């Protein structure tokens, strides 16, 4: 996860592979730990590189991400994790280059990453089982994961719509 974060490998791909290799429960734990570790390293790298260097790397996205992180308060990082508006590594670098306190970063990243990691690990682990050996349990878990994603997207959409007004 650290190497993948440093090379800007898509985090969703890592979570899928982790779930396929380790299953739902262990895959969730490893994926969350890996995301926090990789995110923390690239956050620290953003802090070391500084705003100007990160601006050259991030380009036009930096100002928008920085504004969201600065104006959004406690929920900004959570929302950026729930709604993937920018690549995982880029969000980490920008967060490190802002005035976001370092101890707040994992506390805001974990709740934002958790719903997506749960959904992706359940779907990644259970989809092959449901396809090759269909059962009511496998299909129920897939349906629950899909419902979780849909409900989360709906709640987030409503919350963002209220904030935009």
Image (spheres, helix red, strand yellow):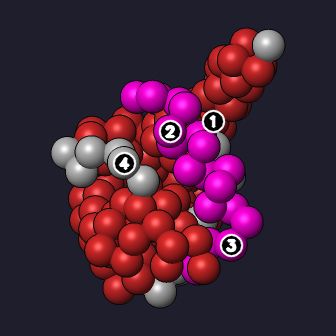
| Residue 52 at x, y percent in the picture | 51, 73
Residue extent of the magenta highlight = 57-75
Real-space Cα distance between discs 3 and 1?
31 Å
Q: Is residue 10 left or right of residue 92?
A: right
Relative to the observer, which residue lies in front, 8 or 59? 59
Whether residue 10 is visible to the viewer of this picture, yes or no, is no
Mark 4 secondary-structure assignment: loop
Identify the residue under disc 3: 59
Q: Is residue 139 left or right of residue 17?
A: right
Relative to the observer, which residue lies in front, 28 or 104? 104
* Residue 99 marker: 4
Name the residue: 58% across, 79% down.
57
| Tag 3 and tag 4, C-beta contact below 8 Å | no
Whether residue 6 is visible to the viewer of this picture, yes or no, is yes
The local crowd at label 4, few if under 14, some if 14 to 19, many if 20 or more residues have their Cα within 10 Å, is: few
| Residue 6 at x, y percent in the picture | 41, 82
Identify the residue under disc 1: 149
- Give the vertical position of 93 relative to 111 (above or below): below
Real-space Cα distance between discs 2 and 3?
18 Å
* Mark 1 vs mark 2: in front: 2
* Residue 70 marker: 2
| Residue 141 at x, y percent in the picture | 53, 38
Quick one: label 4 or label 2, which is nearer the N terminus? 2
Mark 1 secondary-structure assignment: helix
């Amino acid at each position: 996860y650290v190497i993948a974060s440093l090379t800007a490998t898509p985090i969703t791909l890592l979570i899928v592979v982790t779930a396929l290799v380790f299953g739902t429960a262990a895959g969730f734990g490893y994926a969350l730990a890996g995301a926090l570790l990789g995110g923390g390293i690239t956050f620290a790298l953003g802090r070391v590189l500084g705003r100007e260097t990160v601006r050259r790397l991030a380009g036009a996205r930096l100002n928008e991400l920085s504004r969201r992180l600065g104006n959004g308060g406690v929920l900004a990082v959570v929302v950026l994790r729930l709604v993937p508006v920018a690549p995982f590594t880029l969000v980490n670098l920008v967060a490190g280059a802002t005035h976001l306190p370092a101890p707040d970063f994992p506390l805001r990243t974990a709740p934002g990453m958790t719903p997506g990691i749960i959904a992706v690990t359940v779907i990644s682990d259970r989809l092959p089982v449901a396809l090759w050996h269909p059962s009511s349990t496998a299909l129920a878990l897939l349906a629950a994961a899909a419902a979780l994603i849909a409900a989360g997207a709906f709640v987030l959409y409503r919350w963002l719509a209220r904030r935009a007004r």
